[in-house]
Amino acid sequence: MTQTAPTPANQPSQPTPSNVFYRSSKVYPLAVRGEGVYLYDSEGNRYLDGSSGALVANIGHGRAEVGEAMAAQARSLAFVHGSQFTSPVLEDYATKLAAFLDLPSFRFWAVSGGSEATESAIKLARQYHAERGDTGRFKIVTRIPSYHGASLGALAASGMGARRSLYLPLMREDAWPKMPKPDPTLTGEADAERLRAVLEAAGPETVAAVMVEPVVGASDAALSPRAGYHERLHAICREYGVLLIADEVMSGMGRCGVPLAVRLTDSVTPDIVVLGKGLAAGYAPLAGLMASAEIYDTVVGGSGAFKHGFTYAGHPVSVAAGLSVLDIVQREGLVATAQERGAQLLVGLRDLQTIYPQVLEVRGQGLLLGMVLGDPATGKAYETPGLAERIAAAARARGLITYPGSGAVDGVRGDHLLLGPPLNISGAE
Ligand code: PLP
């Protein structure tokens, strides 16, 4: 098999006719193999996975030992329903995950994807307050911009107008108050203080939780927290009896060079931490949440059950993948590698900024990096398709996968490109 970057002449195409419901009308290459940081298509073209898909493939592609762990699990115990059994692999994983994240007394709730996980967090926050007799608390405060998932609750929580607008009739807007975009001219503390006004306007006694992405991903090009921001946010939440949920679906599990990005600058333990993507690094659908012992005891020790569930929650084969991935991340020191390679990539991206004024800003943490793009004269995004989409298409044609943001988000300047190769990428790659 030749291993060349694709050119327009050897761009592969999806089969026609096909029964596949493709996501869009564009032509998709037929991916047939993954190895290390590379993906290969049916024509032998090689692509460097510069975005780990959508910031998922943290340990790279084609790791046989993960496949073997999954096969062994499927052979011994493929499925049990969470209302009937737990499993050794789930017990083992929850313990190791809590230790890795330094959330020692937290409980792990396993689901199949990030949207299921944020939905679970939202419902858990609501039930937690109800169990305490505080039944008036249901609102979830989030930030603009933010992305918490595609299912209706997670989407209602998301501060991303472009993805929500079609479904607004299905959402009760007052249930999802929004904080304004973080203001870099303020100190972290002063910025977090702006939560107070949002809570007061919403009626603090009606708010169940505040949910934030510690490093913003799909909606705002790896926007990073400033010192004091999360600590103050948590303090205000406590003051008002509101839970703090850290959505670390993209930023967690070492992606940002630390196990949890909420602790990049502050020493904070949120009430709920939501995880996904890098958890099983793409080898199986696995996401979940970590809930404090206080929340678990109040809910499960209260009415007796979390009133929520998915058929595939805690699927043993997915959890076996997660366990094997976590072992690799720890054994190979990939959290530290994310920091080193991230620093290297940041230098390269900043070089681009000196050549192309359309790169308005380069930022991020570890291997969750973003370039904000736009017209240097106005700082605004170009017309659709944005510059990010065009760069992503051009890069793909040359054998590099990136993750473009979908044009200007809610009038926020620029469109953007996320970069985040597997954490085990080498310096040369
Ligand atoms: N939360 C965050 C921060 C995300 O970045 C995403 C996906 O990009 C989600 C939630 C939703 O995850 P999923 O696409 O696995 O449902």
Image: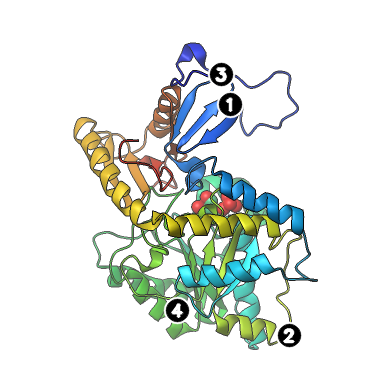
Find disc 4 in the rendering and name its residue.
237
Q: Which residue is more in the foreground, 424 or 357?
A: 424
Mark 3 surroundings within 10 Å by alpha-carbon count, few (fewer than 14), some (14 through 19), many (20 or more): some
Q: Quadrant of residue 321?
A: bottom right
Q: CA distance from mark 4 to mark 3?
A: 54 Å
Which image quadrant: the C terminus?
Answer: top left
Q: Residues within 10 Å of mark 1 (few under 14, many from 20)?
A: some
Which residue has dot 1 on it? Answer: 28
Viewer-side residue, 368 vs 85: 85
Residue extending farthest top: 9
Mark 4 or mark 3: name the one nearer the start of the chain. 3
Numbered circle sitting on residue 303: 2
- State whether residue 150 is above or below residue 404: below
Nearer to me, 314 or 304: 314
Whichever of callouts 2 and 1 sits on the residue coming sooner in the sequence is 1
Q: Position of residue 341 (x, y in %)?
A: 31, 47
Name the residue carrying label 3: 43
Q: Earlier in the sequence, mark 3 or mark 1?
A: 1
Looking at this view, name the residue that lies furthest to the right: 84
